[in-house]
Image (cartoon, rainbow, N blue to C red):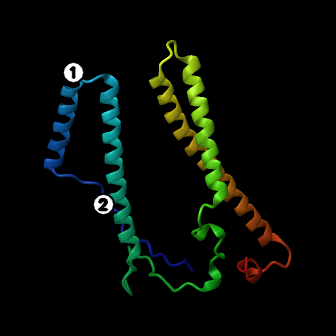
Amino acid sequence: MQPPDDRRAPLKPPQFALRTLLLGVTLCAVACAAAQWLSPLAVAGFGFLFLCIVAHVAGNSLGTRLRENGSQPLVSGEQTAGRQVRRSIAADEFAEATQLSRHQTLGRPQWIATLIGIVCGGLGGGLGAALLSRVFDQSIILLGVVAFSTLGGIGAFLMYSFVQVGWNALVHAQKSAEPGAGRDAVSEH
């Protein structure tokens, strides 16, 4: 017997009106005209900012449509392209919930790791800017400190999070694999 399938209709391809196309062409023309008065770095920065905003809006729109599509159950008795409708699922057909399903605070070690990354990144960026610049300029050193402290904080946050989640998943998997550790024994932890 073929398992039931409850897939919804796929998303429609993205569409836009003529007004949107003309607005996009106008913005491109304005950006090309502004390139005469602005430096190439500023034009690239504004272009990157614009692309980030467009990607955010498109992702938000797509996510909203996917959530709306997936949150609505199939109508009882409805067939989707010759497939069977959804059936009720028994509780023993799913694996137990892991710690990743729970929302928890980051905790003090996460904050400490992030602060260490900020300090180390700032020191490295300031020292690197001071040693590598031909002329001693405080604004260059300040820019190096700010940029690398931001990158160091983000990097430390991501590395610590990855290690913490990986470690917790490994510990949970080992507890589940122990002989005699049944479904009830693991769900208590």
Query: Considering only order in the chain, which callout, 2 or 1, is on the residue closer to the N terminus?
Result: 2
* Residue 101 in the image, given as x and y percentages of width and height: 59, 70
Q: Is residue 33 above or below residue 102?
A: above
**Alpha carbon of mark 1 to alpha carbon of mark 2: how far?**
40 Å
Q: Is residue 140 left or right of residue 161?
A: left
Residue sitting at x 60%, y 48% = 114
Which class describes the residues within 10 Å of circle 1: few (<14), some (14-19), or many (20+)? Answer: few
Q: In front here: 85 or 114? A: 114
Residue sitting at x 19%, y 37% = 27
* Residue 174 in the image, given as x and y percentages of width and height: 79, 66
Q: Is residue 1 left or right of residue 61?
A: right
* Residue 159 in the image, given as x and y percentages of width and height: 64, 47
Residue sitting at x 74%, y 77% = 186
Name the kind of residue labelled 2 in the image. Lys
Secondary structure of the residue carrying numbered label 2: loop
The disc label shown at residue 170, or none: none
**On the image, which quarter does residue 83 sit in?**
bottom left
Q: Which residue is mark 2?
A: 12
Q: Which residue is mark 1?
A: 36
* Residue 181 in the image, given as x and y percentages of width and height: 81, 78
Q: Is residue 76 above or below residue 47?
A: below
